[in-house]
Image: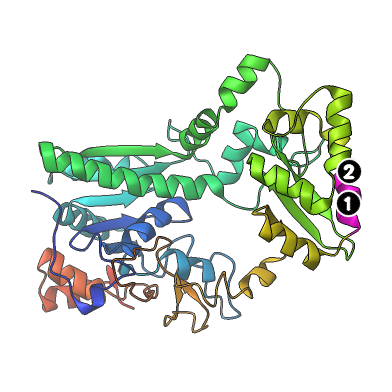
Amino acid sequence: MGPCLRRGTATGLAMYNLLSGLSVIEASSFVASPTAGLYCAQFGAEVIRVDQIGGGPDFHRWPVTAENNSLYWENLNRAKKSVALDLSRPEGRELLQQLVRATGQFITNFPAGGFVSHDTLAEGRADLITVRVMGWADGSPALDYTVNNSVGYPMLTGTGPEPVNHVLPAWDLLTGAYAAFALLAAIQRRSVSGEGGEVRIPLSDVAIGTVANLGGIAEVLYSGENRPRLGNAVYGLFGRDFVTRDGQRTMIVVVTPRQWANLIAALNLGDAIARIESERRVSFAKDDGLRFDHRDALYPLFEQAIAARDHADLAVAFDAGGIVHSPYRTMLDAVQDPALVANNPIFGAAQNPSGFAYPAAGAFATIPQAERQPPRPAPLNGQHSEEVLTSRLSLSSGEIARLIDAGIVGVG
């Protein structure tokens, strides 16, 4: 059997319909695994999330409204369907197993053993594809915040000596995106060979593999030491934060010779830069590394020149020269930027379970040849239990009523 295909319906409209006809069962919590399902749903897959009746461990995760509705949960689970089961009881667990086998695709961060082990599920569906998000590869638990500490980034961030944790759960998000990619890769293999299988994606491997892909492992082994703490300076480039005359802190980063030349011209620093080049017998025109190595001489010149100009004046000059820059601002400031939110087509309106109206994100990609559908809301817990159990498992209305009365199935 191949992937479970279903005819598109009005309720199946998503942000784009590239994955229309693909159905996935998701049993997960927190960030990484739900993100994988979200990305599939945003491209048109039918993603059926199975939770404990009343919600899983992340159902009320902050940020929450005054009524304790999780704004986090309703945004990570947009465009999905919800089936609520009592997973503490054998009959509820068996229903989840049946749904996975009937569908053929499963995303989860449940432990590798137990009632949703791939081997157990594949006994009734040999071509089943399971994508399992994990903490450590040996099955030990981990979170983004502990994995990040383990690979060394907090000891590179800030000026030191204390480590600086990052607010953004980067490894969760990268793992979720990689899990969605892995699911589609496994489906492609199955379409050719007929083989199913399990793909395990530990946060720890995504983190240390990313360190390797960025040259970090090679760097420390080659040098025999850690990279120095740089604060807001960018390693290997001319890039740092500076403060304008009117007190605006702004980040400036140069990545091309043209940007460097235009930055010098905008700040009228040509003669001063030439003197440093002559004194140190270097040329900064085309060498990122030299600009970084000689930042002790360059930064004071730029600090003085930028401190003599207002931000609005500099922004006009920088934009004209194609110089990459951005003022620091709060998240509330960013949300109120029309270019980022109000006039950005990735956002739209949706009827949210929390009852709070705000711009909802759809697919991040834009496909000029396709019509973008509006974002869909997250489901209520158990909102689609009856629909899914009828369509997937062919249960009668009487049997579903019995399961509801017995507390095995919940309905929204």
Q: Which residues are magenta?
A: 300-308
Which sits in the foreground, 186 or 223? Answer: 223
Residue 47 horizontal/vertical position (percent): 29, 62
Q: Quadrant of residue 217?
A: top right
Looking at the image, which residue is at 17% across and 42% down? 122
Which sits in the foreground, 383 or 162? Answer: 162
Q: Judge whether 224 appears above or below 98 on screen.
A: above
Say whether residue 73 is left or right of residue 52: right
Looking at the image, which residue is at 39% across and 63% down? 366
In three-dimensional space, the C-alpha distance between marks 2 and 1, rounded to whole angstroms, equals 6 Å
Label 2–label 1 contact, CB within 8 A: yes
Looking at the image, which residue is at 75% across and 49% down? 263
Question: Is residue 37 in sight in this rendering?
Answer: yes
Residue 401 horizontal/vertical position (percent): 19, 78
Residue 133 horizontal/vertical position (percent): 40, 44
Residue 301, numbered label: 2
Residue 204 horizontal/vertical position (percent): 50, 35
Q: Secondary structure of the magenta portion, mostly?
A: helix
Under circle 1, the secondary element is helix
Looking at the image, which residue is at 78% across and 24% down? 282
Residue type at mark 2 is Leu
Residue type at mark 1 is Ala
Q: Judge whether 7 appears above or below 260 on screen.
A: below
Which sits in the foreground, 391 or 405? Answer: 391
Question: Is residue 407 in sight in this rendering?
Answer: no
Density class for disc 1 (Cα within 10 Å; few <14, some 14-19, many ≥20) is some
Q: Quadrant of residue 226?
A: top right
Say whether residue 269 is left or right of residue 233: right
Magenta-colored stretch includes residue 57? no
Residue 305, numbered label: 1
Q: How is the image coloured?
A: rainbow
Magenta-colored stretch includes residue 307? yes
